[in-house]
Amino acid sequence: MLNLFALTNNPAKRIVKFDVSQPVQVDFTAYIKAQEVKFDDGVEEIEFDGKYKPDDGEVLYIDNYDEIEGLEVAILNPLSVESVDPTEEFFLEIKALFTGYSNQGAVKILLQNFDRRKIISTNGLSIFHSSNVYKKIEGIGLTVDTKLTATLESGKLKFYSFHSARNIFDLTEYYKVATDDDLREFLQADVIQSVDAQLFLDHSDTWIRRKVSLIQQSGILQNVPLNEIKAIAADFNIPLSTVDENGTEVISIPASKSDLKKLLRFLDEDYYKSPLSKTNFISNSKRPAN
């Protein structure tokens, strides 16, 4: 049977375990094993080079990844792991769920991204349907996702989305620095203002090039409507303005380098709002964003 663990942002409780009933453990094991089969089924492994986007039937991998969080230790010795603190405050510190097993001496770790949308909160009145009626949920809960984000076995980290995998692991050394051609492609996005490409290139340091690369990989400019981007930017007081180009509203590229970096940080989703204090933060440093 598989155990369920959480990887958190809390240095004092980096790894914790969910104490589940035996029937739940049985269902969870079958549920996750089915996801593992789907994750691995008939895919070609492509070594990640910092820029490759997999096609259907392909999965990315990084060899010799140094797992420093102690996930294997937890799986091999679950009784040594502290139990989850069943409060919403602590659940908000969870960044990933994981489980795994030992197979002929090698430990395979199965991971899912986790965020507040998967928390079944005790705030308000939460109910669930059972035996033809709706019953009140007495304690905090969570929803286990329908698919795996990544697997890690014998130093091989496998994932389909670099953007999702880096929400769990520190993959800083694998960040691709955008080339001049990548920067030009970024400027040619339908929602980006037409500017002097060479001037933009001249002002693009390594930080800017890394952010542009990550934004390109996330596909956020193609997948999120501009009106939603504007509304969220306003909520965080990010200097995002738009201009009209041939009848189309596009994001204006700031002339100020500091404002450009704030814009790129925002587009790379480095900002978040604390659900408890309603304070805006920059995710890497946890310092107020305003």
Image (cartoon, helix red, strand yellow):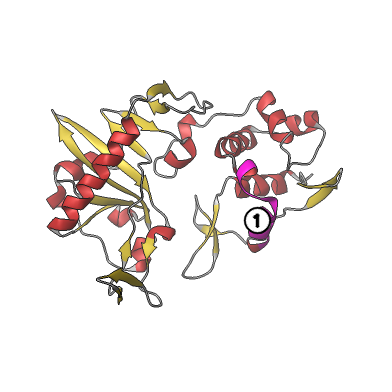
The residue labelled by disc 1 is: 228
Vertical placement of residue 285 versus 48, above or below: below
Q: Residue at x 51, y 27 (%)?
A: 50
In which quadrant is the C terminus drawn?
A: bottom right
User: Does 169 sit left or right of 259 as displayed?
Assistant: left
Can I make out residue 221 in this image? yes
Q: Is residue 112 above or below residue 105?
A: below
Which segment did they paint magenta? 222-234
Q: Assess whether residue 16 is covered by the magenta stretch.
A: no
Q: Residue furthest front?
A: 132
Report x, y in % for residue 228. Answer: 65, 56
Is residue 71 rendered to the left or right of residue 79? right
Q: 238 or 284: which is nearer to us?
A: 238
Image location of residue 283, percent across then percent down:
50, 53
Q: Residue at x 37, y 62 (%)?
A: 119
Figure check: 21 above or below 175: below
User: Of residues 62 and 158, which is closer to you in this image?
Assistant: 158
Residue 176 is left or right of residue 15, and the answer is right
Q: Quadrant of residue 63?
A: top left
Position in image of residue 245 (x %, y %): 85, 44
